[in-house]
Image: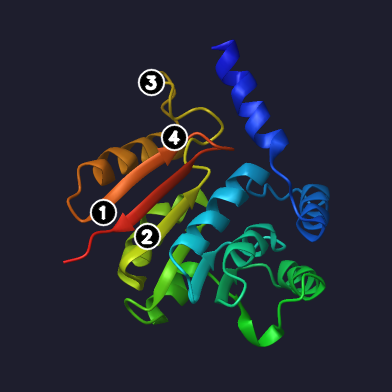
Amino acid sequence: MASKDLSWKYVEQSTLEPEVIAAARAQSLELGIDPISPATGAHVALIAAATNAASIIEVGTGIGVSGLWLLTGAPDAQLTSIDVEADHHEVARRHFTDAGHPAARVRLITGKAVDVLPRMNEGSYDVVLIDADAGSLLDYVEHALRLVRPGGAVLIAHALWRDTVSDPARRESTTTQLRDLIAELEASPAVHVALSPVGDGLLQLVTRRS
């Protein structure tokens, strides 16, 4: 087990994070926001690049860490990011600008994702990233699978929820909800599924083509 811990730390510490993202991460932590880890960011950037993403939607902006990583992989993509905190969006906008992303390609929507997502166009996105309140996770995943195009990716951050999902003795609501969601998706014929232990866990789904 110790070697696994060392490998995890090696992966995180060897990930080179662009300066603008590192600055956004530091400010996130100051504000009490829990952003995706650097290695998780590298994963989502890779997926955005591999899918040649042109249109991305993100549930949970924070102050821009995950969005910046997504645009690292797909710098010409249109990013739509939803967060309930208007103050966070003001700060995130500055980080996107500092990173050189034109305002016209970064659409920040302030509101509850459960209210916003139903208005988004079905099958219109190449990548959907979910990094928001766990209480509405099932709703977010349901919407994400509707919004993503065939062959597109749905990414769920914090999927191992502070190392509790792997412990069968832990029965907290968020933990059991994630455990049940993973099992349900693994059994679904509609998606390819991979669960990575990187960061706090990254659940990766790719919708199967008809």
Query: Which mark identifies residue 191?
Result: 1
Judged by depth in the image, the label closer to the viewer, 1 or 2, is 1
Q: Residue at x 37, y 82 (%)?
A: 121
Q: Secondary structure at mark 4?
A: helix
* Contact between labelled residues 2 and 1, with CB atoms less than 8 Å apart: no
Quadrant of the rendered image containing residue 66:
bottom right
Label 4 crowding class (10 Å Cα cut-off): few <14, some 14-19, many 20+?
A: many
Residue 103 in view in this figure: yes
The residues tagged by marks 1 and 4 sit, at their Cα atoms, a distance apart of: 22 Å
Q: Amino acid at mark 3?
A: Pro
Q: Amino acid at mark 1?
A: Val
Q: Nearer the viewer, residue 110 or 57?
A: 57
Q: CA distance from mark 1 to mark 2?
A: 17 Å
Identity of the amino acid at label 2? Asp
**Local SS, label 1:** strand
Give the distance between the C-alpha atoms of the residues marked 4 and 3, in whole angstroms.
Answer: 9 Å
8, above or below 117, in the image: above
- Sequence-wise, the earlier of marks 3 and 2 is 2
Pick the residue in front: 123 or 90: 123
Rendered residue at 82%/72% (across/down): 98
User: The disc labelled 4 sits on which kind of residue?
Assistant: Thr
Q: Nearer the viewer, mark 1 or mark 3?
A: 1
- Residue shown at the point (72%, 62%) measured from the top left: 63
Specify which label sits upstream in the sequence, 1 or 4.
4
Q: CA distance from mark 2 to mark 4?
A: 16 Å
As displayed, is residue 77 above or below residue 58? below
Image quarter (top left, top right, bottom left or bottom right) of the C terminus: bottom left
Label ID, residue 139: 2
Q: Quadrant of residue 168?
A: top left
- Name which of mark 2 and mark 4 comes first in the sequence: 2
Q: Which residue is mark 4?
A: 175
What is the x, y in percent for residue 197? Answer: 50, 33
